[in-house]
Image (tube, rainbow, N blue to C red):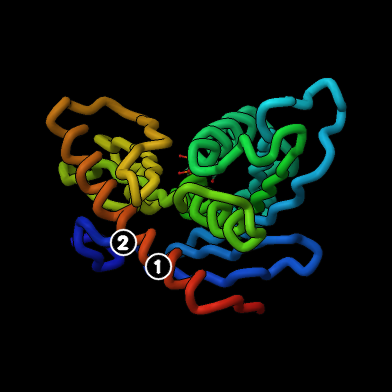
Amino acid sequence: MRSDKRKDDEFRSVKIKLNVVKSALGSCYFEMGKTAVIAATYGPQDVKPKHLEDAEKGIIMCNYNMLPFSVEGDRKRPGYDRRSVEISKVVKESLEPAIFLEEYAKYLINIDMQILQADAGTRVVAINAAALALACAGISMRDIVSAVAVGRANGKILVDLTKEEEDAEDAIDTPIAIMPKFGEITLLQMDGIASVDDMKKIIKQGEAACQKIAELQRNALKNGIHSI
Ligand code: UDP
């Protein structure tokens, strides 16, 4: 039994609010259990510095940042570190395949993600929020991007690990993002040592959970624009 009584293949409860940032064209608050993120998009706008401009396609810049009060226990040192640079990069790479970048040649789209509360899975929740913020901003996309972390803790394959589960001795943590319409994986990372069999199970469970998350994302978009 998991400490929050979830089934092994169940993700935490999700709350979504769209267009929560007045000054941004598109934004989203995405909560999954005790992990909560706000994502906001700016642009398409001119690329600065100009030499970064691409005549063939648009440029995406992602900024992932964990707020000092987002973590349990000690305050997180404010500002960027190696982890946030890595996560900004993988989030960008997980979103890019879903965007018709060729429609935004010479332009830049910024996506800022602030982690308000962290209880594991912040990068995947940031991806879910960012994909919805892009859709709210009317950015042309071939699909939404849906993400979840699947892994192993205490000998079991579990969907959407909490920090407590991630800290288990035998833990594997595998963040996965997919484009649900095409069933294509856009992010697959792994922390830990897994057998090929475990990896197959993890990917299968990850895809199934992402499809359910995609349903929630689509519902949020269909049900109109909500503001806090
Ligand atoms: N964490 C923390 N302080 C940090 C970085 C991470 O407390 O400076 C915690 C936080 O709960 C985070 C978890 O460790 O969600 C797992 O971090 P990881 O790097 O695996 O990325 P995530 O699972 O959040 O995508």
- Please give the count of numbered marks on the rendered protein: 2
| Residue for point 21% across, 32% down | 199
Q: Quadrant of the C terminus?
A: bottom right
Residue 51 spot, x, y in % from top left: 83, 20
Residue extending farthest to the left is 197
| Residue for point 30% across, 36% down | 172
Residue 205 shows up from this direction: yes
- Given residues 16 and 178, the one toward you in this image is 178
Residue 48 spot, x, y in % from top left: 86, 32
- Given residues 200 and 60, the one toward you in this image is 60
Location of residue 85 (image quadrant): top right
Q: Is residue 196 left or right of residue 114?
A: left
Residue 68 spot, x, y in % from top left: 69, 51
**Circles 1, 2 touching at the beta carbon (< 8 Å):** yes
- Given residues 79 and 107, the one toward you in this image is 107
Q: Is residue 74 left or right of residue 206?
A: right
Q: CA distance from mark 1 to mark 2?
A: 7 Å
The type of residue carrying mark 2 is: Lys
- Given residues 46 and 192, the one toward you in this image is 46
Is the residue indicated by label 1 positioned so its CB lies within 8 Å of ligand 1?
Answer: no
Residue extending farthest to the right is 49
Residue extending farthest to the top is 51
| Residue for point 50% across, 64% down | 31
Look at the picture and state if 56 lies above or below 176. above
Is label 1 in a helix, a strand or a loop? helix
Which residue matches tag 1?
Answer: 216
Residue 120 shows up from this direction: no
Location of residue 100 (image quadrant): top right
Q: Quadrant of the N terminus?
A: bottom left
Which residue matches tag 2?
Answer: 212
Q: Is residue 157 left or right of residue 69?
A: left
The type of residue carrying mark 1 is: Leu
